[in-house]
Image (cartoon, grey):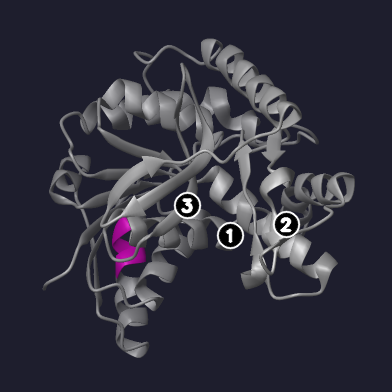
Amino acid sequence: MNGPVVGLVGAGAVGQTLAASLVASALRGRLLVVSRQPEQAVGLAADLQDLAHTARSRTQAEAGEEVADLHGCDAVVVALRTDFKNTAERDIRRQGATANAPALGALARELRGYSGTVIIVTNPVDLMARRFAEVSGCPRVFGIGSNLDTARYRLLLARYAQVSPDLVRGHVIGEHGDRAVICVSTTTVSGRPVTVPVRAVVNALQHRPALIRAGIGRTRCGPAGAVLSTLRRALGLADGIEELSVPYGDVWLGIPVRFTSGKALPCLPPLTRSERLRLDAAASSLRDAYTRLPTPNERIAS
């Protein structure tokens, strides 16, 4: 079958929703599902095959037997999550750092030498994207956190301005979490600057994951949409800008990345002094948080 081969690591709630989105979007090519629990991968692949047939999708879903199978993929999406209970009211996305870092490190070691695109979904995504890139040495690693924050920002601002979200241009950068930085100075609605109700928008952005978690237990659909959009750019199927976690000095955090025929180029917008200070504060916080992660050589507990 012609078309890209996309690998997916993780068959939990987010992985399942992401896989279904990829199949339903009729992305021509193969979807290879790999899980630490092989029976999950086999079961999800069978369910996706049913979806592909009933939806007349061109995507061919199948289960991979081991991580080594992913080396032949054009792109790999990492949506694994270890078991832990998250009861935090603040810094919600950082709570999985200690639990998820060893699993990301182990996967990264198995994917050393992989030359395709890696998209990290696992939270805290800025820390996990950096960990994966440093351990694996893979040249094209992106985290999707700020992409979702930006989509939410544009949606919330469109509701405030009573316009279509397509008319809103603006970025959310920095950390995917409580230290996200809204680029108010370059935000426009219908091509014109707009007065942004910053406090209300920030509160809504911070409250949204808790709102979703209270209702359905975990955010699923938003990350799936962010990955699908990023995949299209990274695979060269469409050009455009995505807000992704990439290197920024000695840390990783979200900034806009312009894709042209699959080639990625960071394109940070002009920032006011206040916006720059908040971005630097997010970088400092992420720098400190990264030093507290378990060492890359630590094995996953059995």
Residue type beneath disc 3: Glu
- Mark 1 and 2 residues: CB-CB less than 8 Å, in contact? yes
Query: For residue 60, which quarter of the picture?
Result: bottom left
- Picture coordinates of residue 12, whole percent (x, y): 47, 53
Residue type beneath disc 2: Ile
Residue 302 visible, this orientation: no
On residue 242, which mark appears? 3
Quadrant (top left/top right/bottom left/bottom right) for the C terminus = top left
**SS state under label 3:** strand
On residue 272, which mark appears? none
- Picture coordinates of residue 79, whole percent (x, y): 43, 46
Residue at left offset 39%, top offset 64%: 19
In the image, is residue 133 above or below residue 163? above
On residue 212, which mark appears? 2
Query: For residue 202, which quarter of the picture?
Result: top right
**SS state under label 1:** helix
**SS state under label 2:** helix
Pointer 3 or 1: first along the chain: 1
Q: Which residues are magenta?
A: 41-45
